[in-house]
Image (cartoon, coloured by chain):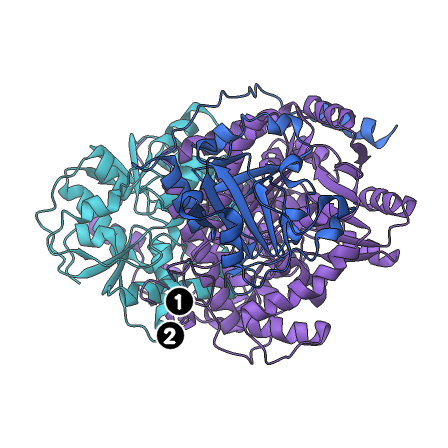
Chain colours: A purple, B blue, C cyan
Amino acid sequence: MSAANVLHPEVIGDRFEGAKDAQGRPLVHAEGTSKPIRAHTRHEPQPRGARDSGNRPVDQVEAAERFIAATEHEKAHDERLWDMRLRRDQAAHALPEWEDMRGLASRIKEHSLAHLDTYLGQFEAAAKANGVVVHWAADAAEHNRIVHQILKDRGAKSLIKSKSMLTDECGFRAYMAGVGIEVVETDLGERIQQLDGEEPSHVIGPAIHKTRADVAELFARTLGSDPDDEDIPHLASIQREATRPLILKADAGMTGCNFAVADTGTVVVCTNEGNADLSANTPPLHIASIGIEKIIPRFEHLAVFLRLLARNAIGTPMTQYTSHFRAPRAGGELHYVIVDNGRSERLGLKEFWTSLKCIRCGACMNTCPVYRRSGGLSYGATYSGPIGIILDPTLNRRKYSSLPFSSTLNGSCTNVCPVKINIHEQIFAWRKVMSEEHRLPFVKSEMMKVLGYVLSRPALYRAALGAADEALRLLPHFVLANSLNTWTNKGRDMPDAPSQTFHAWWRENRGPKSNSK
Amino acid sequence: MSAREDILARVRHNRPAGDYGLPPIPQFAIPIDEQGRLETFSRTLKAMGGQLCRSSEMASPITWIRGRFPDAKIVCSAVPEVPSDRAWSAIRKPQDLADVDVAVVRAVLGVAESGSVLFTEAELKVNTLAYLAQHLVVLLDESAIVAGLQDAYMHSAFRTARYAVFHTGPSATGDIEGVLIHGAQGVRSLTVIIGGYN
Amino acid sequence: MRVGLFIPCYMDAFEPEVGVATLELLERLGCTVEYPVDQTCCGQPMTNTGCHQDAAGTEALFVKNFSSYEFIVAPSGSCVHQVRVNMTAIEQTPEVRAVRQRTFELTEFLHDVLKVSAFPWASFPHKIGLHYNCNSLRGINLASPSEIKTVPFSKPRALLEKVPGVEFAEPTRWDECCGFGGTFNVFEPAVSVKMGQDKVSDHSRAGAEYIVSADSSCLLHQKGCARHIGNPIKFMHIARILNGASA
């Protein structure tokens, strides 16, 4: 396998271990990588996520530092996600209409959000007419209570579920554990994270930050398997065999919702494993948790989103399974729990409401150079990466006030977003909000006051640069104190100081010319 | 005020100002291979881990199945063309299909763009058939292959079926180190047999 | 053509030779270049941090210094992006709007306005890795970014292709951010440095002798990272090459 075209050739393996086609050629679909990427170490402990900060601002910087210090994990993570980004480019750019479709998807979502009450009403009416029981939850706690009540009313004690960011957002698993309902995640990555007591680190691949050694150690600890068995097909089959009986005996099944089609009351769920279909069709009861922003008008619009989603997320035309639930199956029950949890408030934020367009493809995370080197768990929130930065402050302004600064504002996220959310511009706008709400660390806001003062006064500025425009020994951003001298203490050498500033050169060589008015 | 009224009121109150009209959706052309939709479908299906063969190449589907899956004890067929080891009258609940080795179902249609096949509860008889079985064999009429997803969504199944699902190859995941596995939780293989199955 | 020259604060302090090259280049191309002495900064350090009120005085000073020019040119796309896109802390009078619209980055000025077709005094027989500052690339469209399906173009590359001897090395991630990110490099240094080291290694492995960019801020950061890991790769601002520098 050629390692020529990667940043970190040392994590490119020499043997393709994944599924092959009938001719023995490597297959690349679902979350599989196009080349083998593996950290060549068993011994590097898995870097854990952001430290619990309670309600205080999350220290993403510290967690990112630890992730980078786990050099093998960081390199493999970076390459794996960049591989997804490249596969996205290949699949997306194969469609001449790609950019047109992004524009269409954006307009469909904006229209749906601008008429959300109408479409929600339509969706509910259609669903009820189909025999679906519809519930409304104003917030996370209400969602959890409603689901609990549904289960309690039927004496259900065990629940299997497919991946749903909304349920993670609601703290669903912790709540259910508290009321004695057994919840089993059926998605492999989500199950790995559940067993490890961690949140998902990426919307598409919840355990994408883990090496096989991490998974082997985890399964040994929680499922009693051999800790030295790192064969990935075997590890996957361990989970398959362990989870299957739980699926068969579960009292209820739960899914999320990728799209909610208003005119027919249909819930659409996309997976690669088929675990949403198992969760929904095996037990007699299916509960779907639906964020209000998932509504789209009709199936012709669904086609646009589906042609964008898997190509943008994993570089394939579709996910392995695309399921449409419109009515309970014969002898079964179907419940929808429609959840707000701050979305209706976000709709009223002029600069940020378009973040509701998000279809959870994860492409922004794949392309973000900061995310790839920090890991999703460093953000300390359900939603991480660029989309997380602009969503999380609406869920907890104080706790996530630091996140907008975990970005270089490079704008790649905006360019890959299938629904054209101007992510990096919203990150920039959140910084303004945080500053105005006095949520910046004291040092930072003081530095800006000083800079703002000095930079607006030419004479003072020149004086601050040193007498007679001498070369400076200061950092380029005029850092005030030694404790802030991060230019050098993290791996950069100081720039050479020239003998004179441009200003001084100009005065000497072109003479004083004042600004003509 | 109920949560419903509460939420709808807030949504109405916070409606973004401006004209956000619904755009018309053009029909995008799907590049179809020179040899036609079947060849395109065959290529896209295989890229997603599926297999394809033709009924014209086999004595009968069941002969092919027995040859391909010699260790299969239970073949459960939802189609009249293929005999079923499991009688449908014996299937009372979804879990009863847990021991099925090979499931045989008909597809409503195939999608050339992606290599997908479509089922509803009518084709599956019991929905878990396509998920609890170890392997899935799909009978697809060649004339039922549409060009793209936009075409597929025009089918009436989406308005009438309780459950409709696209399968695009077998169950798969790359959740551990990006190593591709088939049979993550659902079927380990998906094979489409193309024939005249009107 | 009368041009007002804006030299970024960090260039003034650390890379005056780039300012000199910019001035000389514009003069060679027939411009009358004036340098308002009271200029300081575009305001980006403050707006980048969300502190727009703190940027207001600096923004007003910029407008005051440059209000008489039909063309304002700066050898820094990130500063130009700040002026054209984010200079909103001050009242948007007609004068302010005019100054903002008339501010150009050097390569876009050469490519779009002067439409330079040759640099007869220049020669640079070296293999170079061309680096794009992200504000320049995605903010003011100096080139087509890799995420977007479009007809590819690059203004800096088009100019460099006119310099005899220039060869381009192709890194694996040509438009990945290098990690400078304005105040990001101060407040999230571990990630910033890792990005810079990766960037430098990428260009090195592609065979670049020089990393060339239209933005010094990125180059200063990358150079610091390179030297720390013992990578001797050289750095040069595009203005110097176009102005005839040989090394």
Looking at this view, name the residue that lies furthest to the left.
C120
Residue type of the residue flagged with mark 1: Gln
A375 up-or-down from A333: above or below: below
Nearest the eye: C124 or A423: A423
User: At 72% from the left edge and 23% from the top edge, which residue is drawn?
Assistant: B12
Determine crowd level at label 2: few under 14, some 14-19, many 20+ residues with C-alpha closer than 10 A.
Answer: some
Residue A69: mark: none
Q: Is residue A89 left or right of residue A162?
A: left
What distance separates the C-alpha of mark 1 from that of mark 2?
Answer: 8 Å
Nearest the eye: C58 or B111: B111
Q: Is residue B55 left or right of residue A170?
A: left
Instruction: Name which quarter of the figure residue A54 lies in.
Output: bottom right
A23 up-or-down from A170: above or below: below
Q: Which residue carries the number 2 mark?
A: C229
Tag 1 and tag 2 share a subunit: yes
- What is the x, y in percent for residue A190? 66, 58
Residue type of the residue flagged with mark 2: Ile
- What is the x, y in percent for residue C30? 14, 37
Chain of the residue on which disc 1 is drawn: C
Secondary element under disc 2, as helix, strand or loop, is loop
Instruction: Please say if the residues under marks 1 and 2 sit with CB atoms less than 8 Å apart.
Output: yes
User: At 34% from the left edge and 47% from the top edge, which residue is drawn?
Assistant: C76
Secondary element under disc 1, as helix, strand or loop, is helix
